[in-house]
Image (cartoon, rainbow, N blue to C red):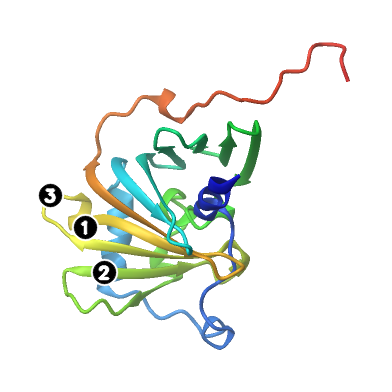
Amino acid sequence: MKHTLAALLVVAAPVAMVPASVAAQTAPAPTPELAAVSAHLKALQTMTASFSQTSQTGQTLTGNLTLARPGKIRFQYQRGVPLLVVSDGRALTMIDYQVRQVSRWPIKNTPLGVLLDPDRDPSRFAQMLPSGDPDRLLVRARDPKHPEYGTITMAFTRVKGAPAGLRLDGWTVLDAQNNQTTVRLSDQRFNVAISPNAFKFTDPRPRRLPGKG
């Protein structure tokens, strides 16, 4: 279906966006900015936000995001889009209710792993990119041992009162076919109470009856 690719670009494991010559270099020593990003992620327990997701073709989907570290996230798409992307802490699952299809990936094997996995400290494998604004941080992260897990470029703004003084404003992912998807966040709320039921979903696949093949 038309929207499936757009949602998949949030979770699929793309190849790295950096050239091989750059990828082979040793990661630089952590900078104060990278240390601030790591401190933000450690201080971030939960977050809710509105999101807009724009694909390479310019198609934009909107919805609501719910996040709870470690490992849990939910992309609830706008009305009329029969998709749901949710992680229960172990696997990231995409549900297409129109075709009754469920796809799953280990969370660590996706670009979102850097946001959700507390064992992946970005100060160990990420690098800062120039932003042109001292209050705006751009961080490109990839696991050098597993470049197939993908690259994610995250954008932060220095905001007083946000966890460790940073606000996550969104990210960009590039897939194996060089299709770029950008997610922008707004109305962020940090460390608010979230029900555990927020990361459950209704499985649309037909249930097999006992004794049936």
Q: Nearer the viewer, mark 2 or mark 3?
A: 2
Q: Is residue 21 left or right of residue 182?
A: right
The amino acid beneath tag 1 is Leu
Q: Is residue 153 left or right of residue 177?
A: left
Q: Is residue 53 left or right of residue 191?
A: right
Q: Could you tell me which quadrant the C terminus lies in?
A: top right
> Which residue: 65% across, 34% down?
99
> Which residue: 22% across, 50% down?
163
Residue 120 position in % (x across, y down): 47, 57
Residue 76 position in % (x across, y down): 42, 36
Residue at the disc numbered 2: 137
Residue closest to the eye, 181 or 148: 181
Residue at the disc numbered 3: 161
The answer, for residue 128, to whether it is visible in the render is yes
Do residues under tags 1 and 2 come within 8 Å of each other at their CB atoms? yes
Report crowding for label 3: few under 14, some 14 to 19, many 20 or more residues within 10 A (C-alpha): few
Do residues under tags 3 and 1 come within 8 Å of each other at their CB atoms? no
Q: What is the CA distance from the residue labelled 3 to the residue labelled 1?
A: 8 Å
**How many dots with numbers?**
3
Vertical side of 155 occupied by 30: above or below: below
Q: Secondary structure at mark 3?
A: loop
Q: Is residue 149 left or right of residue 89?
A: right
Q: Earlier in the sequence, mark 1 or mark 2?
A: 2
Residue 113 position in % (x across, y down): 49, 53
Q: What is the CA distance from the residue labelled 1 to the residue labelled 2?
A: 9 Å
The amino acid beneath tag 2 is Leu
The amino acid beneath tag 3 is Gly
Q: Secondary structure at mark 1?
A: strand
The answer, for residue 88, to whether it is visible in the render is no
Q: Earlier in the sequence, mark 3 or mark 1?
A: 3
Residue at the disc numbered 1: 166
Q: Could you tell me which quadrant the N terminus lies in?
A: top right
